[in-house]
Image (cartoon, grey):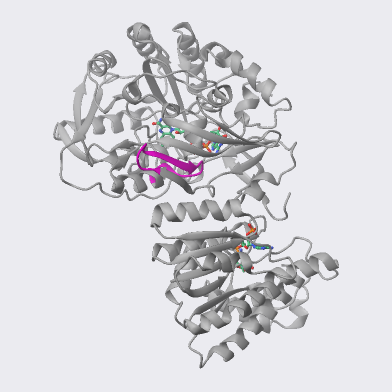
Amino acid sequence: MIDGLVRKTRFTSFDGTLSLCTEHQRPDRFSHLESPDRTAFRIPRGGGYAYSAASFGGHSLVQEMTSFNRFLEFDPVQLTLKLEAGVRLIDLMEWALPRNLHFPVLPGYPLITVGGCVAADVHGKNPHKDGTFSDWVKQLTLYHPQHGYISCSPDEHPDLFSMTCGGYGLTGVITNVTLQLAELPAPAIALARKRVCSLSEANDCLSSQDSDIAYSWHDASPGASFGRGIVFNGSWSRTTQQPRPLTFRPMTADSRARLPFSAWNGLTARVANAAVLLQNRYQNDVSETGILAASFPFASNIYFHTLFGKPGLRETQFLVSEAKMGDCLVALEKLIRDTAAPTMMLSLKRFRGTQKSLSMSGTGCLVALDCYRNEKTDAFLRQLDQLLVDMGGQINLSKDSRISQEVAELAISSFAGFKERLFEYDKERIMRSELSHRLGLL
Amino acid sequence: MTYIIVGGSSGLGRALAEKFASQGCELVLVSRDIRDTAALAADIAIRHGVKVSPVAMDLGCSPLTFDAIDRVLSDHLPLKGLLLPAGINDDDDEVGLGAEKLGFITRVNYLAPCELLNHYLPLLVANYGIIVGFGSVATARGRTRNAAYAAAKNALASYFESLAHYGADRGISCQYYILGYLDTNLAFSQNLLFPRAAPDRVANVVYSKRLTNGTYFLPRLWYILYRVIQFLPWAIFKRLTF
Ligand SMILES: Cc1cc2nc3c(=O)[nH]c(=O)nc-3n(C[C@H](O)[C@H](O)[C@H](O)COP(=O)(O)OP(=O)(O)OC[C@H]3O[C@@H](n4cnc5c(N)ncnc54)[C@H](O)[C@@H]3O)c2cc1C
Ligand SMILES: NC(=O)c1ccc[n+]([C@@H]2O[C@H](COP(=O)([O-])OP(=O)(O)OC[C@H]3O[C@@H](n4cnc5c(N)ncnc54)[C@H](OP(=O)(O)O)[C@@H]3O)[C@@H](O)[C@H]2O)c1
């Protein structure tokens, strides 16, 4: 190892539930990336926005890839852009928009990196229309200390490519990615808000539309207003306005947890949700929003996350087939009411995609649920795990920091296959994180 | 106009490359590994649309050969500036360091920048050019740690003073920066007493002062700390373990 490149750093999962101190390297040169001993355990890290401890782990060197953030090649005919894995989504979009280009699959925070998006095969605002991140990856280069640099794509080393998309960094460090961009249809989004009284009404509403942005938000506190919410439908607007730059103060796992206590509890959750519903009642049905603001809603609205404070939050996300969705929503509401669960808000999205490695994808409907933490939280979530296993649902490992190996085996159809191929490819299992440890991928 | 940035692959050198390119300057980027400078050259060409040529060169080698830089320079606009942010330190750098490491630290931090400067001086004088060197607050006073590094940077500071004297009536602009801690990999593992400056902020200052002559402290707070350390009574200084 080259002198002076490693320090001890305390890492915390974005949900604030796990924190540990381990070795940290921030390579900014290829020689630095390659410098650790070939057998040293390590895990790549992007922006650190996974809710779970997917990009750090005890006794594992964290290789933070944020300095590998250069744009490498642009093909103006094919509209493909080759860039390094540490490029943040905001940098990609700020480069693309003035050139009338766009990248359709954007998770909700601008400082998430391209490498993190591939490794968790993330989704954007309408996975039913746009699929997941890996659907837009043409090629990637992977570095593994024992295999060197390998270029892979759906045609070249296809097995390694599909293991890496949704592989949570366990196949190696992604150094660069070639993305398929799209032409920007218009500089803004016309976002329509429709109030709904229940989850099932929102589900019906979402299934009957195919707009560019489609998701719903709901009050999930177990009271009279449970399920009330708003369905957001966005389509490109013919406005002449230019895309507005996004101004925001960066939020990290550490800054999110600055408040020493959680401001969210049963009462404050109900009050805040009622305020959101009230605010939207008086709002125009349709409003024009810049593409960046519509894509990264959590950039300017940091209060939701920061008010969970140091105790943190629990989020869980699962995907259920459309056939089972009706029953699932009824059972979920019953479970929340029966257990007086510490749930705060819930969101629905329709989904389409191909499940790979450890990713959450497929055709169906996604439920995302946020809980504040108290003595009931983990017991409630265990019951929810059982419910989603019974419904044949899939879970999102980047959003839920407590999924056990048993649940993962049942709720990720390709888990066993991924494990077998990973053990074959990386015999010493050099790439390790708390997530891989928890899932028995050692 | 073209600038050569020696040590242009990372840290301050990379920030300087981005700043000067954003202002439309063509660049030649020099460091040991062409993979780094080629990636940065591609990035700058895509983002800023300016021409950048990467060159691999190890400043630790002796004698230095300039052919590779000279070759690419012929494809660029006239040479306007030479920025020398390359630098290296070593965890083992204490009094008593072995000859090989002592030689390497001295070459990279002192001899090679001076050789480069001497080689391009005629061209820079002809173009009323700019030469920028970078020192360190480690030079305030010799300590057990960073002994060779501080000595080499002190020698560089002295050479830049001579350069300023030489260039005074020859129309070149010459700046020498004494830098405090930077948020780069050079000091990544060190527990430091004061905050690290962002390299892009330092690069902005370097760009804005490029037509001046003088020695500057960055961040400026370091001017006071530097003088305090220089004037600390020996009885106190010898007990410090930083
Ligand atoms: C406010 C907020 C909103 C979000 N919204 C969404 C959303 O709408 N949709 C969605 O799907 N997700 C969403 N997420 C989750 C987020 O997109 C994922 O967790 C993503 O993986 C984070 O990427 P990162 O760059 O922060 O990487 P990290 O969190 O640092 O790492 C995540 C995983 O990627 C791996 N990784 C990172 N870089 C590399 C690399 N170069 N090579 C190999 N592996 C690598 C790590 O090992 C780790 O397994 C959101 C998160 C937050 C905090
Ligand atoms: N960081 C600090 O806290 C600090 C404090 C005071 C002063 N400084 C000074 O500020 C300047 C910039 O430092 P930094 O923090 O930006 O350092 P850095 O991030 O380590 O960058 C150093 C640059 O020098 C190049 N380099 C090193 N050895 C080389 C060699 N043998 N041949 C060719 N190129 C070589 C490196 O490229 P390759 O490694 O790829 O060759 C890299 O581009 C240095 O002069 C340093 O002494 C830094």
Q: How many marks?
A: 0
Residue A104, percent across and down? 34, 33
A427 lies left or right of A274: right
Residue drawn at x 60%, y 28% as measured from the top left: A435
Residue A147, percent across and down? 68, 33
Residue B182, percent across and down? 57, 63
Q: Residue B172 versus residue A218: which sits nearer the camera?
A: B172
B60 lies left or right of A158: right
Quadrant the C terminus of chain A occupies = top right
Residue A27's place in the image compared with B190, above or below, is above
Residue A79 among magenta residues: yes
Residue drawn at x 44%, y 7% as measured from the top left: A391
A255 lies left or right of A145: left
Q: Which residues are magenta?
A: A75-90
Residue A120's place in the image compared with A324, above or below, is below
Q: Which quarter of the picture shows residue B147?
A: bottom right
Residue A246 among magenta residues: no
A130 lies left or right of B194: left
Residue B8's place in the image compared with A144, above or below, is below
Residue drawn at x 25%, y 16% as measured from the top left: A198
Residue A231, percent across and down? 24, 24
Q: Residue A71 versus residue A395: which sits nearer the camera?
A: A71
Q: Residue A328 versus residue A16: which sits nearer the camera?
A: A328
Q: Residue A75 versus residue A14: which sits nearer the camera?
A: A75
